[in-house]
Image (spheres, grey):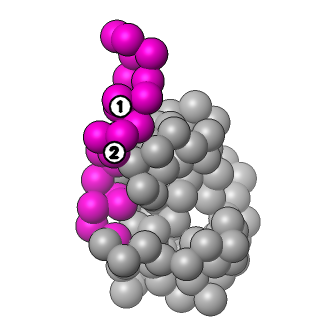
Amino acid sequence: MSWLKRMFGMEKPQNPEQAMSGQAAPQAAANAPAGETIAPERIGLNGEYDQSGLAKRVALAFDQDPQVADCDTVWVAQTGSTVVLKGKAPSQDTLNRLTQIANNINGASAVDTNQVEIG
């Protein structure tokens, strides 16, 4: 089962690369109050405002990487612009890869792995 399906009950979008970019959709920007924009960590898979947008984009990025796509014992969440990983990683290498992927997503300022055990 994919990361998105397991955590958010969502299917992968048709254009995953665009979804992971974290760019606000033109209609979302047009609907924002004058002078306001959507914070990068709140941009969803379709460019809309989404409270869990960063976590969803990170989950999608994990789905796109064959090294970690099948890892089903780690969960992803967010606190503001910090990606929070929880659960049990099969190896330190897997956790390092998850951290690297999450750090490269637009809007991520840090990755918290304190709630992940190895083994």
Percent from the top left, x then y, of residue 91?
54, 77
Q: Do the residues labelled 2 and 1 touch (CB within 8 Å)?
A: yes
Q: In which quarter of the image is the C terminus?
A: bottom right
Above-or-below relation of 69 to 108? below
**Residue nearer the viewer, 49 or 76:** 49
Q: Which image quarter: residue 32?
A: top left
> At label 2, which amino acid type do we have?
Ala
Q: Which image quarter: residue 3?
A: bottom right
Q: Which image quarter: residue 8?
A: bottom right
Label 2 to label 1: alpha-carbon separation: 6 Å
The residue under the point 45% across, 16% down is 33
Label 2: how many Cα within 10 Å (few below 14, some 14–19, many 20+): some
Q: In the shown orientation, is residue 22 left or right of residue 11?
A: left
Q: In the shown orientation, is residue 92 left or right of residue 26?
A: right
- Magenta stretch holds residue 37: yes
Q: Furthest residue to the top?
A: 35
Percent from the top left, x then y, of residue 101?
37, 61
Above-or-below relation of 81 to 19? above
**Residue nearer the viewer, 102 or 106:** 106
> At label 1, which amino acid type do we have?
Ala
- Magenta stretch holds residue 27: yes
What span is colored magenta in the figure? 16-38
* Residue at the disc numbered 1: 29
The residue under the point 34% across, 71% down is 16
Q: In which quarter of the image is the N terminus?
A: bottom right
* Residue at the disc numbered 2: 25
Q: Is mark 2 on a helix, strand or loop?
A: loop
